[in-house]
Image (spheres, rainbow, N blue to C red):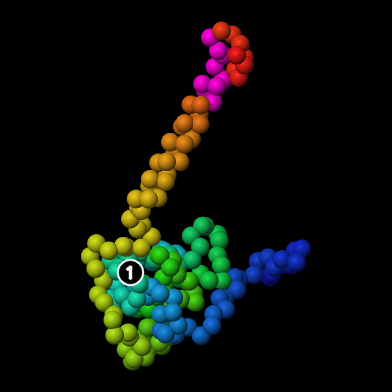
Amino acid sequence: MAPVVVGGALLGAAPAAASCAEVTPASLLDGGEVVLGTAVEVDGHRAVLDVEEVWSGPDRAPRSRVVTGETSPDVSSSGDVELVEGERYLVALRGSRTDACSVLVVGDGGDVTTAELDAARPADVRAPVEGADEGGHGPVVPLAAAGAGGALAAVLAGVLVLAVRRRPRADGAPRGLR
């Protein structure tokens, strides 16, 4: 199918590739949260990584979920990346999300060789931790839960006040007048 221009928009064309600055292990570390792992389950833009090492950021579980792009059907962006099951990756994360500019394929023929990876490995690399955040489904923050409960209480209180104010007075006079 040939691309069609309608009202200045290009329809039917493949999505543009991400325009990234040079992606290196060092540039990924600037992002804060970096893990080394192998994709063991891939379903479109969702994957499970078998985490070997946590290079930076909070602890990660040995199996961590990663979102690699738009998750809505028929929606894509230039930042989407699909991981390949069995491939080894160095991934910068923001929570459970990553993008095409934050992933390096590790190994011969990949973006970075094992030797280059070893040379870039920080001294404080750690192993994944059982029970740590698996990504994508982190623990509920108590303050957020309390905030949601408080908002619900405020809405219910407002409904109660409106119900009481709309009831006619016992003496038949309009509300607000004595």
Point 68% across, 70% down: residue? 2
Residue 78 percent location from the top left of the image: 56, 71
Question: Horizontally, is 95 left or right of 74 in the view?
Answer: left
Q: Is residue 21 above or below residue 63?
A: below
Residue 13 percent location from the top left of the image: 64, 70
Q: Amino acid at mark 1?
A: Pro
Point 32% across, 63% down: residue? 134
Question: Horizontally, is 57 left or right of 126 in the view?
Answer: right
**Residue 87 seen:** no
Point 46% across, 32% down: residue? 156
Point 51% across, 31% down: residue? 158
Residue 77 percent location from the top left of the image: 56, 67
Q: Residues within 10 Å of mark 1 (few under 14, many from 20)?
A: few
Q: Quadrant of the N terminus?
A: bottom right
Which residue is more in the foreground, 174 or 85?
174
Q: Quadrant of residue 40?
A: bottom left
Residue 20 percent location from the top left of the image: 54, 80
Which residue is more in the foreground, 174 or 68?
174
Q: Is residue 70 above or below residue 84?
A: above
**Residue 52 seen:** yes
* Farthest top residue in view: 171
Question: Horizontally, is 104 left or right of 40 in the view?
Answer: right
Q: Which residues are magenta?
A: 162-170
Label 1 sits on a secondary structure element that is loop
Q: Quadrant of residue 178?
A: top right
Q: Which residue is mark 1?
A: 58
